[in-house]
Image (cartoon, rainbow, N blue to C red):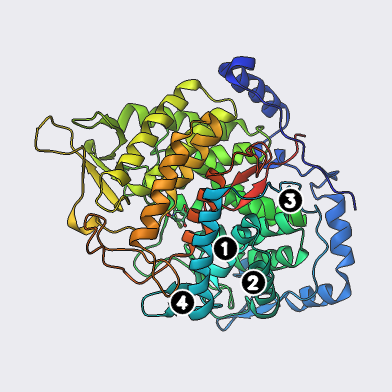
């Protein structure tokens, strides 16, 4: 099988082409090529019915055993009723047996990096300390509880281990990677009667497996990804095709949370990079079709405000619920991120995504941006039924990075001005705290009063969960500007993590109070994203090698798992 080398997409800077030109040219191409969900094709031949020839071959090669299994599924019993499979929530899949032969081989997003510099060695040291705790007290479990030296389970799928696989690869931790791979090979079994959150498990598990496949070229990870992806598919069997929030990967029973039939907008719109890539790799169209149905639906849905989306959507009606509340924080954040990143992933052909993204940025500027006092920090607040609130989640700190990424890919220069301003604000959200670590939520002071600081924190919001967003954005800002102050800011934050969240026996812990350096109060939990994202972005931030996971060859999912940018058609 030929390894399709994914060439770096042509640079389309605003200077070269003019931003308006980018849009109009793309629009024409888009118009000629039919609806968006049919436009994205892997770089293989496509037959009449849209299924790739290679995929057909592969499916044929999967052989008789698979066919027999399918036949047995034509009539199934689901909760006492005999129903046709199309009407049913799909049955659980058999555990993945042999490694599958991928349709598209692992991409060349990885090249051997230069030896780590001093700061990168600092990150490796931090990772190994985190890993020591996980190995000793939580091996194969979801999350380390470093203070009580035990673990907690969320899905019971070794979440931290999977989230950290590609970080180990990138940091060059061969032994640790090898040991973790062995666990995946021998112990990771998705045939489990357990509910998983579709979004969280997609970005962490599916994303982690796919990126590790691309980095390592080891088909074990793709086999596992395909198995897991199939088990998530019942989530899409809703009247509106807007997926349920939860799905049981063992029984195939998908459902909303007990108290509502709503799903969260960010959750249903931030699984696309992963499912699209899974389709590209396996040739199985349904993954991509399911998530693009959601994108299409939300694109044409009313209830937005200048490109800004509400936080909830109903799985029965397909309509936004609780309208009139707009935030870039929890429940909406990665909707915006994935508009841009899907456009990049698909080789900048899906103009609708770009248009929605650009419109949303204008919506942010029009409705959510303000400046604080006394330092005039630019921040992104929230709007609830016409009332502005000067509240900004730390989660919003993904935005400067996303804006910078857009500029790298040719979007207007004023996006970069906003990225720089917001980056300064996110840094201040860390720097103005006694511990040098950001609270979960900040409130900005908008009135000139001598006794007030720019950033204020309510008692309930003083915790820090070891989240990545500030350092994620620092990584992008440094890549795009090469301004070393961003590296220095990241280094300060790493020192603060070491000083206030490190647990001597191994691991790092989220803390309760970023404003008390004497008593930060460990919460006794190391979230999987600390090793999946925070430390990875710090390591990449400190690298001066632009080719190390180049922004022109890969796009990071919202859990920091790099996936290839598809070849231009
Ligand atoms: C991660 O799971 C992802 O970054 C997600 O997009 C937001 N929440 C956490 C990190 O804060």
- Marks 4 and 2, how far apart in space? 18 Å
- Marks 2 and 3, how far apart in space? 26 Å
Residue 180's mark?
2
- Marks 3 and 1, how far apart in space? 24 Å
Give the residue number, with chain letter if any, for mark 1: 164
Question: Which one is in front, 312 or 433?
Answer: 433
Q: Quadrant of residue 83?
A: bottom right
Q: Earlier in the sequence, mark 4 or mark 3?
A: 4
Give the residue number, with chain letter if any, for mark 4: 153
Residue 280's mark?
3
Image depth: mark 4 or mark 2 in front: 2
Above or below: residue 214 compared with residue 256: above
- Asked whether the beta carbons under mark 3 and mark 1 sit within 8 Å of each other, the answer is no
Please indicate, yes or no, whether residue 313 appears anywhere in the rendered image. no
- Marks 4 and 1, how far apart in space? 16 Å
Q: Earlier in the sequence, mark 2 or mark 3?
A: 2
């Amino acid at each position: 099988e030929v390894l399709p080398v994914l060439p770096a997409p042509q640079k389309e800077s605003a200077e070269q082409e003019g931003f308006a030109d980018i849009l109009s040219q793309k629009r024409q191409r888009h118009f000629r090529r039919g609806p968006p969900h049919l436009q994205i094709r892997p770089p293989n031949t496509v037959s009449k019915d849209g299924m790739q020839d290679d995929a057909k071959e592969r499916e044929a090669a999967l052989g008789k055993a698979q066919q027999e299994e399918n036949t047995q599924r034509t009539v199934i019993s689901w909760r006492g009723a005999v129903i046709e499979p199309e009407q049913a929530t799909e049955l659980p899949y058999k555990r993945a047996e042999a490694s599958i032969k991928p349709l598209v081989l692992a991409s060349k997003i990885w090249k051997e990096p230069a030896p780590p510099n001093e700061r990168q060695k600092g990150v490796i040291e931090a990772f190994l300390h985190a890993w020591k705790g996980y190995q000793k007290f939580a091996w194969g479990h979801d999350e380390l509880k470093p203070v009580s030296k035990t673990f907690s389970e969320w899905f019971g799928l070794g979440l931290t281990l999977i989230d950290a696989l590609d970080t180990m690869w990138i940091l060059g931790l061969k032994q640790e990677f090898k040991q973790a791979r062995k666990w995946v090979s021998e112990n990771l079994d998705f045939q489990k009667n357990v509910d998983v959150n579709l979004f969280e498990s997609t970005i962490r598990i599916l994303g982690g497996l796919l990126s590790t496949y691309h980095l390592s070229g080891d088909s074990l990870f793709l086999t596992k990804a395909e198995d897991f992806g199939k088990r998530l598919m019942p989530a899409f069997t809703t009247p509106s095709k807007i997926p349920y929030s939860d799905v049981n990967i063992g029984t195939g029973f998908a459902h909303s949370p007990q108290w509502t039939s709503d799903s969260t907008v960010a959750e249903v719109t931030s699984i696309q990079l992963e499912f699209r890539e899974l389709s590209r790799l396996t040739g199985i169209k349904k993954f991509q079709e399911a998530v693009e149905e959601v994108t299409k639906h939300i694109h044409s849905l009313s209830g937005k405000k200048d490109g800004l989306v509400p936080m909830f959507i109903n799985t029965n009606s397909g309509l936004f619920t609780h309208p009139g509340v707009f935030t870039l924080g929890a429940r909406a954040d990665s909707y915006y991120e994935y508009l841009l990143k899907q456009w990049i992933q698909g080789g900048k052909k899906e103009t609708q995504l770009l248009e929605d993204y650009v419109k949303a940025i204008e919506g942010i500027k029009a409705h959510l941006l303000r400046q604080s006092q006394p330092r005039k920090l630019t921040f992104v607040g929230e709007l609830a039924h016409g009332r502005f609130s000067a509240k900004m989640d730390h989660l919003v700190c993904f935005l400067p990075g996303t804006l910078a990424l857009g500029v790298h890919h040719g979007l207007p220069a004023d996006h970069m001005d906003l990225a720089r301003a917001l980056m300064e604000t996110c840094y201040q959200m860390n720097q103005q705290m006694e511990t040098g670590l950001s609270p979960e939520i900040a409130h900005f002071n908008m009135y000139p009063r001598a006794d007030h600081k720019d950033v204020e924190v309510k008692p309930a919001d003083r915790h820090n969960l070891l989240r990545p967003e500030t350092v994620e954005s620092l990584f992008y800002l440094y890549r795009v500007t090469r301004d070393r102050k961003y590296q220095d800011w990241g280094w300060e934050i790493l020192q603060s993590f070491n000083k206030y969240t490190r647990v001597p026996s191994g691991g790092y812990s989220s803390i309760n109070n970023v404003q008390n350096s004497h008593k930060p109060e460990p919460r006794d939990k190391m979230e999987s994203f600390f090793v999946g994202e925070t430390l990875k972005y710090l390591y990449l931030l400190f690298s001066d090698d632009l080719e190390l996971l180049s922004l022109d060859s890969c796009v990071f999912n919202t859990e920091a798992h790099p996936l290839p940018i598809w070849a231009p058609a």
